[in-house]
Image (cartoon, helix red, strand yellow):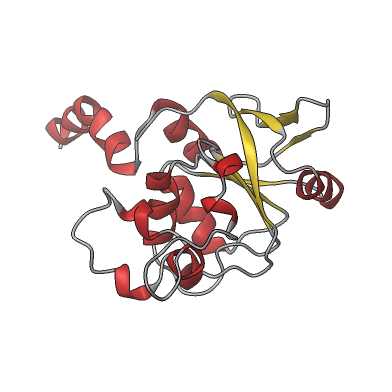
Amino acid sequence: MEKIIKFSSKTVVMANEDVDTDQIIPARFLTLPSKEGIGECLFYDWRFDESGQPNKDFILNKEESQNCSVLVAGNNFGCGSSREHAPWALVDYGFKAIVSTSFADIFKNNSLKNGLIPITVPKEMHNWLINNPGVEVMIDLENTLIQTQHGHQSSFPVESFSRYCLMNGIDQLGYILSQESEITKHENKI
């Protein structure tokens, strides 16, 4: 996992409400053998038409969305089934953070475990971000703060262990492995 401490990016706005994990990554792609390349399947049924050609009207296919690592999403993002493939696809596509007023709990936890920051902001800030697509934002995970170039800012909640893992670029297994000497010391006492 990539370390995430502080970064800036323009935003991509996809204000759809109740986007479920089957829309994020359709079920037919859940059998892919690796996380690598799964970003190609992100929002597949919205990004591509029936013949596999890019839908020129979909926001991620537009020039202004290229190289953006912050998605501003509608309320209740990531609802539906509990597939870890959804944050895998978002991260592989290039997103580091999703901003919304709320997230489905399982999606939020899966995101934190896979290098994606789910940022919950108040409705006023969310509305401003929705109405100002492409705005530059700075995300400071160390201080749990999101700030726009126009001075709008909000703190956001992140559970401390997840924050530690994201800032150190490790997942839960990586954390356990980093404690190997302490674990061995404890086992030797027994």
Measured as percent of width and height from the top left, residue 38 is found at 32, 55
Residue 149 placement, left or right of 82 = right
Q: Nearer the viewer, residue 77 or 155?
A: 77
Furthest toward the right, the residue is 124
The residue drawn where x is 54% and y is 52% is: 60
Q: Which of 169 and 44 lies nearest the eye of the viewer?
A: 44
Residue at position x 59%, y 29% in the image: 141
Q: Along the line of sight, which residue is nearer the eye, 69 or 187?
A: 69
Image location of residue 118, percent across then percent down: 58, 47
Q: Is residue 30 left or right of residue 34?
A: right
Q: Is residue 181 above or below residue 44?
A: above
Q: Quadrant of the N terminus?
A: top left
Residue 27, located in which quarter of the rendered image?
Answer: bottom left
Q: Is residue 131 left or right of residue 27?
A: right
**Image-based side of 32 in relation to 63, left or right:** left
The C terminus appears in which quarter of the rendering? Answer: top left
Q: Is residue 114 above or below residue 67?
A: below
**How many labels sit on residues?**
0
Near-viewer residue (160 or 82): 82
Q: Position of residue 67 (x, y in %)?
A: 50, 35
Residue 185, image x, y percentages: 18, 27
